[in-house]
Image (tube, helix red, strand yellow):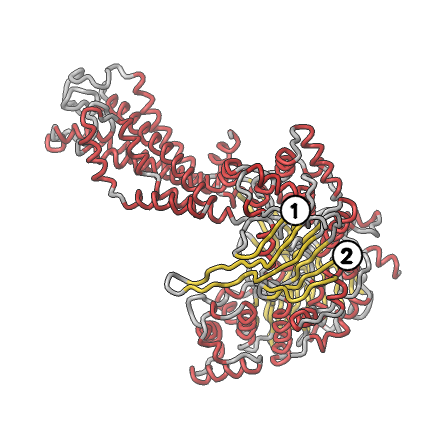
Amino acid sequence: MLKILRDLLRYNREFAAGVALLGFVILVAAASFFSPYPAADSFVVPPDMPPSWPHVLGTNSRGQDVFWQLSFAIRNTLLFGFSVAILSRVISLVVGLVAGYAGGMVDRVLMSINDSFIVIPLFPILVLFYFVMRERMSWAWLALAMAALGWAYDARLIRSVALSLRTREFTQTSIFSGMSMRQILVEEHLPYVLPIVFSTTMNNINWSIGLEVTLSVLGFTNVDTPTIGMMIYWANQHTAMVAGIWWWIAFPVALVVMTFIGLFLLAVSMNEYIDPRSRLARMGV
Amino acid sequence: MATDRTRAVLTVEGLRAYYQVNTFGIEREVRAVDDVSLHVNANEIYGLAGESSCGKSTLVKTIAAAIRPPLRVLAGSVTYRFGERRVSLYDLDEGELARIRWKHVSYIMQGSMSVLNPLRRVRSAFVDFAFRHIGKPMPEFTAMVEAHLKRLHLEPTVLDAYPHELSGGMRQRITIALATVCRPDFIAADEPTTALDVVVQKSVLAELRQAQRETDASVLFVTHDMAVHANLSDRLGIMYAGRLVEEGTTAEVFATPAHPYTAHLIASLPRIGDTQAREGLGGAPPSLADPPPGCRFHPRCPLAMDICRREVPEMAWIGDTHRVACFATKAETA
Amino acid sequence: MSEPLLDLHGVVRTYSRGGLISSDYFRAVDGVSFRLEPDRPEIFTIVGESGSGKTTLARMILAMVSPSEGRITFRGTDPARLNRRRDRLAFMRQVQPIFQNPFEAFNPLKRVDRYLLMTARHFAGARGRDAERAADQALRNVGLSLAEVKGRFPHELSGGQLQRVAVARALISRPALIVADEPVSMVDASLRMSIVNLFKVLRDEHKVSILYITHDLGTAYYISDRILIMNKGRAVESGDARTVLDNPQHPYSILLKSAVLSPDPASREEALAP
């Protein structure tokens, strides 16, 4: 594992750049554990100060330090993105692999459910979800809802690979070696869909963060948990742009853009590395 | 005859073509064609035989100027003679290469679908490949193509068919017609009948031979199937692990194979009406990324001597048209 | 009379062809019957060109596809009707396949010994050391040993070696029938005969019946006891292999035999006359 990381860092610039960007973002997120102020407290510092020492990114109109707010926000946003991605990957892997391998009736049933999820309009459903949940709304609930809505495209992608894997001779060898369906899916087929899973994970994180920001900016989430979207929401509430408090908006936006680019670079480079064809080339086929 | 290089349409000398791969710091070099010299005379079918990954397809690619990275030509030359004109393939630029392809040198591959566009009629393939080389107005061009098809016992109506409407054998026959319509001096054919059934294979081979005789072309015909070589090739070269190990007229090679590998290949062919026990050869072909020293066949050779493990045998003439790279044969004839 | 090992009676398999509006049925296998007797191991060859239905037939015998009409029974039971995993395992213990492409028969990303050990575990109930011993024993029957194969990926072995590993894997469960679909067509010429000879050894020493499916009349003549020639889903001629191939009666069999190129340059002019 360490050797793989070393190889990637040495031979793949995209990977190195991605690691650097994401590493920086994670450092900022980790800083939140050392914050001198609790995340939810307001008016702990003088409001509306431009970036200067000791408030390096300035302070906002609610009397909070933008840097420490930002570190809480990016931590929650990242956690949110990863939770959605991991949950929805599990669903799409199970559905995609099983549908592709089992075929027939199982495939048809799973794929009709799958297609229903593809055509459901996401945004209105999430807004509706907020109005139903209201006070009980938390980022955990939102993550669960988005994971339940965000797996369908990728399940179809995984199914298409699984369909072709089913017809490969080694699948038959596995069956006639007495392996169970679970063994075949996990041990024989999973390595072939991992590249898809990885690249879609990165895309899914980007997608869920983007959607979370959108919902938050519009105020359709829990306003007490600081996220990047929530920061922008508050900045808008206090008409920060009009008041010239640009640092309240510019820094969260910059950090989220860095996260997006970092994830994208990682997806591209990991894909190339983990792809079975490239794996086989390195093994010396 | 074979030493008479003046009649040669194609001369290959000391050719080395390697695949060089570098992925994530792991460098590999596959010596697919290693020091091969041969020539193909005017108006003959030169057969090239060998097992999978012995370098025969790579050799065809280098000869047909169809190389792409990671394949690289490291040394040697490929020279054609078209009429009085001599052309060294790897001195040409892209534009000159494009003028030579199809007009002078054509290439038939294993899969016909890689030549025929599934969405367009067969006619458009003829127009795309041959129209500008023939340089005649469209009605004349069409008449020429139709006459060419008739000579090869194909109905001109196939021009209006889509590839999927035709059988695999018919498609492969069309690619042969396509490869010969410009009357090229040289045709490189890489396993053109391997994917076909025996009944169809026979008709495709018959057509290829007829087309070759009609157009006085020279053909380099590659297949692993020795029975096909026995019936089609005039001269035969045997490749093993990236090297040419034996060459002679087809009759010579089949009657008196001089290399132990060739002898085994011919002896192991099962025939209908003959139930005599036949043995497989022990061991396996070597990896071209890490070939054994000396003669590459020595780990499997029943005649291996000490020298075979140390030195690489050179191709040496053992008859007017027959040459072989083997120390054991040399010791015997000396 | 004892129960046949394998009995096919009027087996048909149809596939629908075409789209929603106009679909017609295409009979890939059209009324094939034959039987293999128990206690008399033999090499039974099915010869045909592509599209003759020979592979579909093999897939039906392996219970990978079920017949549309007719009946297939293996030792009195219909393999397509085995729904419980335990029953299917019991069937697979007795009938094992060998596939065409040795490089595809094992997952390129996995080590090949894994399949041997899995087979030993699921069919011979052997674990750990016992499984390794069973695998080694089977590999020795095909001229290899576990030491040569252990930890190797498919690309590290030659096609001939891989095909022998595939045969060894099929042998672990001590099957009564091996279905080999074009087992040598992708194996290099210098290694082909050692695989073909192996089938004779399996028949004579291990008492395994072999269903050898091929398009190659040369090897069919060389190893078969009985032969069945298929064309467009139908069995056109069958009987003792040497008798049928020496003197074919059906027009298609005659055509097929005449299309085989002789590996002898003497008759070349007539062979390829247009």
Tell me where residue C31 appears, x and y as whole percent: 58, 61
Residue B256: mark in rendering: none
Q: Quadrant of residue C86?
A: top right
Taking the spot 28% from the left edge, 31% from the top edge, the residue there is A255
Report x, y in % for residue A144: 30, 31
Chain of the residue on which disc 2 is drawn: B
Between residues B285 and A163, which one lies in front from this camera angle?
A163
Is residue B34 among what the camera can see? no
The chain ID associated with circle 1 is C
Does residue A185 show up?
A: yes
Residue A107, horizontal then vertical, whole percent: 42, 46
Q: Is residue A40 left or right of residue A81?
A: left
Amino acid type of disc 2? Answer: Tyr
**Measured from the top left, where is residue C57 in percent x and y?**
59, 56
Q: Which residue is mark 2?
A: B261
Which picture quadrant has residue C28?
A: bottom right
Q: CA distance from mark 2 to mark 1?
A: 46 Å
Question: Which is more toward the observer, C63 or C161?
Answer: C63
Q: Are marks 2 and 1 in contact (CB under 8 Å)?
A: no
Q: Count residues near mark 2 (Cα–Cα under 10 Å), then give few for <14, some for 14-19, many for 20+.
A: many
**C208 shown above or below C34:** above
Rendered residue at 74%/62% (across/down): C241
For the view shown, which residue lies furthest in the front direction?
C1
Q: Nearer the viewer, residue B10 or A196?
A: A196
Q: Which residue is mark 1?
A: C75
Q: Secondary structure at mark 1?
A: loop
Q: Is residue B132 above or below residue B307?
A: below
Give the amino acid at mark 1. Answer: Arg
